[in-house]
Amino acid sequence: MDHPHPGRPRPRRLLRTAAASAVAVALFAGLAPAAVAAPATGPNPAAAVGPAAGRLDRAELDKKLRAIHEAGIYGAYSTVRDGHTRFDGAAGLADVDTERPVRPDFRHRVGSVTKTFTAVAVLQQSAKGRIGLDRPVGDYTPELLPGERGRKVTVRMLLNHTSGINDYIGDAFPSLLKGTTESLDDHRFRTVRPAELIGYGVARPQLNEPGAEWHYSNTNYLILGEILRKVTGQDPERVITRDVIRRAGLKNTYFPGTDPKISGPHARMYESFYGLIDPPRDYSDYNMTWAGTAGALVSTTQDLTTFYRALLKGDLLPRTQLDQMRTTVDVKDENGKVGTRYGLGIYSIDTPCGPVWGHDGGVFGAGTWALSTPDGKRQFAIGYNLMKYQRLNEAGTAFLDHPADAALRAFKDQALCGTTAPAPAAPAPGAPVPAPAPAPDVEERPAAPGALVDAPAVVLTAPRLAQQR
């Protein structure tokens, strides 16, 4: 299969210059432009309503899933559930050399979708009285966030990304800030401790006064993992496995620890990094200790739909804590328009048939999106194995639109809205989706709202440049 290279070829020097600029924007702007934090007075009204589910149109879902592959994504696999009805589908290639096809049951690195799991574990401990959401982080981990900052930043601010603590990805993969990708290969099999990564983020300049603005940062969720360690006396990944993964009945979801390989059937995971890696390179073998409780989970689309169904139906948290989780801050674009409402490890975005809840994720070579109706009745999850396929303009300030962006949105709308969905509309600017795109008549879009994986803007969450969700 040909590797997608939209747009005219450009000299490698220009690519590197543009990528370096975009990485800086992504790293220091966060998942999306800063948003003023709204008072946490109660759950967002969007939680009460959602899409009017239509029947699962299997033929249309198959067609739109194939369209993602035909638009340039090597392989995509998805699960859609409506009540007791389930669609499992796959399209494209798991291996571009052997042309092995993808399968719906593939395991996959889900990046920042991990954050919802971590948040659930923290809220479970809060329900037990062991963690106070509005208590200072310094009460739990003073060695990680010392001094005045440790007294100002609360657990809630870590959960909803209003702490102002910077991201660690740039220092963990330093070549990214220079517009090159050598760090990805140099650190493929490295084991790194959470305290070291947290130290990188804490040492960087504070992004905003604690509680004042919204800036996506993976550092927040590594600190939350260490708070879990303090209050339980156990490894946080073990706590999440016992209290969240097993309680939800998930069979194929796990933390890989230091093992760089994914156990069980999976696709190769190809990273293009906006054309700097040409042809895209397979990063399916990777030591994920650099992501930990912020983005290291392996799962399947079947397990993710089961998880979000259990969460939103109230099977994993008491009502009080679930309401806290769905208490949001607005994420606004540079024009002040709200595109996403971020809660505690989960966000709400609008679809043609109403608001939905979930999270996205991205690591080197692997993208994920998982969303659910507010009542937990209908879910969709998708994994795909080519990341940062878009191209940057020569200034490194905007992404050139790619057909796969529109194809992913169209599949999402079909999956969540069924036959009731009107023609897909362009997403609100700043919405953290796996493949953000501009309005149909726009050729370029700002690079800040999405870069790597899922963040610090690029690696862990929906497309961002030097982070990962």
Image (tube, rainbow, N blue to C red):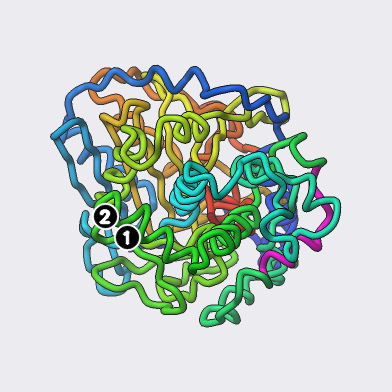
* Circle on res. 41: none
Q: Is residue 359 magenta?
A: no
Q: Nearer the viewer, residue 448 or 199?
A: 199
Q: Is residue 207 magenta?
A: yes
Neighbourhood count class around disc 1 (C-alpha, 10 Å): few under 14, some 14–19, many 20 upward: many
Q: In this view, does 211 lie to the left or right of 123?
A: right
The residue at the point 47 percent across, 67 percent down is 280
Q: Mark 2 — residue?
A: 250
Q: What residue type is labelled 1?
A: Thr
- Residue 364 placement (x, y as % from top left): 50, 64
Percent position (x, y) of residue 222? Answer: 60, 60
In what quadrant of the picture does the N terminus appear?
Answer: bottom left
Tag shown at residue 253: 1
Whether residue 402 appears in this view of the structure is no
Q: Which amino acid does label 2 sit on?
A: Leu
Q: What stretch is highlighted in magenta?
A: 197-208
| Contact (Cβ within 8 Å) of mark 1 with mark 2 | yes
Q: Where is residue 21 in the image (x, y as percent from the top left)?
A: 75, 55
The answer to which of 376 and 317 lies nearer the viewer is 317
Left or right position of 22 against 270: right
Give percent across and percent down for residue 409: 40, 35
Callout 2 secondary element: loop
